[in-house]
Structure formats: C-alpha cells, structure tokens
Image (spheres, rainbow, N blue to C red):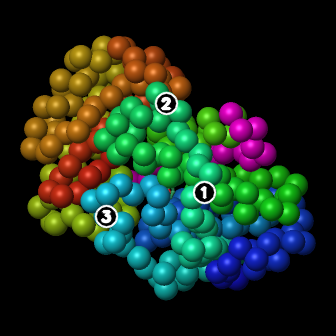
Amino acid sequence: MIVVNSIEELKIATANLKGSIGFVPTMGALHEGHLSLIKRARVECDTVIVSIFVNPTQFLEGEDLDKYPRKDEADKQICKLAKVDILFMPTIDMIYNRDELRVEAPAIRGFILEGSRRAGHFNGVLQIVMKLFNIISFNRPKEFKAYFGKKDAQQLALIEQMVRDYFLNVKIIPCDIVRDSDGLALSSRNVYLSKEERVKALSISRSLKRASKLIMQNILDKETIVKEMRGVMSEIEIEYIALVDREFREIESVEIKNSIILVASRVGGVRLIDNIWI
Ligand code: AMP
C-alpha cells in the first residue's frame, strides 16, 4: 500500500494503472462499516483507493469538527491489512481554495430530513465528493466505481443524483449497513456514547426491527409504524422518523422494495442516524 498526501502524488500513483478503480471515501476512524465497503471494492476492482479526509465544509457551526475522532495510524494499519492499494490523506489547504465555486445540493431533496437539521451539510458533502471523484479519476481509469454506505441514505441518494445531473463518469455502489452484534449501526461517532447511552441507543435499531415486523404483517401505513417506533424509542430524543421512497419523496404508506424508513435521534449529546430499506 502507498500512502499519498498530495494531489500531485496521487496523480503520479494513478498514472499507469490498468483496469478498474474502486474508490472508498471516508472521514477515517475506520470501523467494520468502512471495512465492508473496502472489502467489496477489493473483490470487484483492480485497484482500491481509500481517502481519509475530515471535510470541514460538511460540519456546521457548533458541530463536532474539532473533536471528530482521528486515528490516522490505526487507519493506515487497517487499510494495509485490507489490501488497499492507495491511501489518500490530503490536507485541507490542498483541497480548498478561497472564494471557490460551489456545488449545491438540490433545493428540496437536499434540505429535508438531514438537510433541514443540518442546513448546508449536503452542500459540503457534494463539494468534497465532486472534488475527490475528479482527483481520483484524473487519469481516466477504464472503469471507476465509488462505494457508499446505505447508513447515510440521503447522502447516497444525493450523490447518485449529482452523478446523474452532472453526467459524471462513475458508478455508485450502495453497500449494506453494518451493525454491531447488539444491533447498533456502526458509526465513528459511537465512541462518544457512555455505557448507559449506548444501551439506550439500541432502541433505534429495535424500533426499525419493530417496523419491519409490522410490515411483514402487512401493516404498511406510516401513522401506525411511526407510533410503534416512537413507543420503542420512548427513552431517547427523536429528531425525526421518516418514511420515503427510494427517490426520497415522503410517502404515507410503505411500498415494498421501494421504501426507506429513517430515524435521527440524540442520545446524550450524540446524534445518531439509522435506517432500514424495505
Ligand atoms: P464516514 O467516514 O462516516 O464519512 O463514512 C464513510 C462511508 O462509510 C460512507 O459511505 C458511509 O455511509 C459508510 N458507512 C459508515 N458507517 C457504515 C455502516 N455502519 N455500514 C455501512 N457503511 C457505513
């Protein structure tokens, strides 16, 4: 594995590659969720490139940018063991210029749910993903795939839309959510949870399980599902429970194979999101 810290070095490292590139963008503090994306890229692509970049533009004022977990050395080891070919770890100065052109999230889909709680968050996400796609595919690989987790479902939908709307030459590969054995969706932010908070946080995945049980009993209406889920999560602060189709339009009733149920909550000071694809 080579570790590359600048865009110029990255261009050199990708200059003579043959075959496909599988790209996994991350903010580091790698866990099994990230690893599942890397493993899939390893199986499906000739060259695997992982980026680690804690992107300042997707954090809002007062969010956890400064205390976001950073584990560069451990991350390097994890990538090496996972047989990553190139680990790209740029600095902020290399990526951003002053007064630069901006990619903007769409006015509706980009500003509902996560976008309404974290206004501007997706502008920052799309900005960095666009930049990374251009940097990584600079030498025009034969095939270019990028791997994203369904855990960040709205992010995934918006990146897919950016690829469509801007005619980008990249194939987006959605990857399933990886959970701890107790059901909690893995997240770099889980390290902020105290023991007690972690126990409470388990009600999030339990509520999604409850929803899928109801759906198996053919109970599909939003009102009943949301009410039941609220009951399961009675001990935590719920920011929203939403039912959307795969295009992220809000729906009143589950459509099998075309729906996502999303939860955002706060446990202690920690904001956690999770979802289930129906
Ligand atoms: P992050 O480092 O949080 O920006 O995440 C990098 C990528 O890993 C994103 O595509 C996430 O959706 C994905 N990811 C994070 N947690 C999980 C998880 N528990 N299961 C699957 N993918 C995940």
- Find disc 2 in the rendering and name its residue: 107
Which residue is outermost to the front?
99
Q: Is residue 56 above or below residue 16?
A: above
The nearer-to-camera label among 1 and 2 is 1
Q: Secondary structure at mark 2?
A: loop
- Taking 160 as reference, is 120 left or right? left
Q: Quadrant of the N terminus?
A: bottom right
Most common SS among magenta residues = loop
Q: CA distance from mark 2 to mark 3?
A: 25 Å
In this view, the residue in front, 32 or 85, is: 85
* Number of residues whose C-alpha sits closer than 10 Å to that of mark 3, classed few (under 14), some (14–19) or many (20 or more): few
Residue positioned 60% across, 57% down in the render: 100
**N-terminal-most mark, 1 or 2:** 1
Q: Secondary structure at mark 3?
A: loop
- Taking 149 as reference, is 228 left or right? left
Residue positioned 77% across, 66% down in the render: 47
Residue positioned 23% across, 39% down in the render: 239
Name which residue type carries label 2.
Answer: Ala
Q: Which residues are magenta?
A: 165-179
In this view, the residue in front, 103 or 241, is: 103
Q: Quadrant of residue 14?
A: bottom right
**N-terminal-most mark, 2 or 3:** 3
Q: Quadrant of the C terminus?
A: top left
- Find disc 3 in the rendering and name its residue: 64
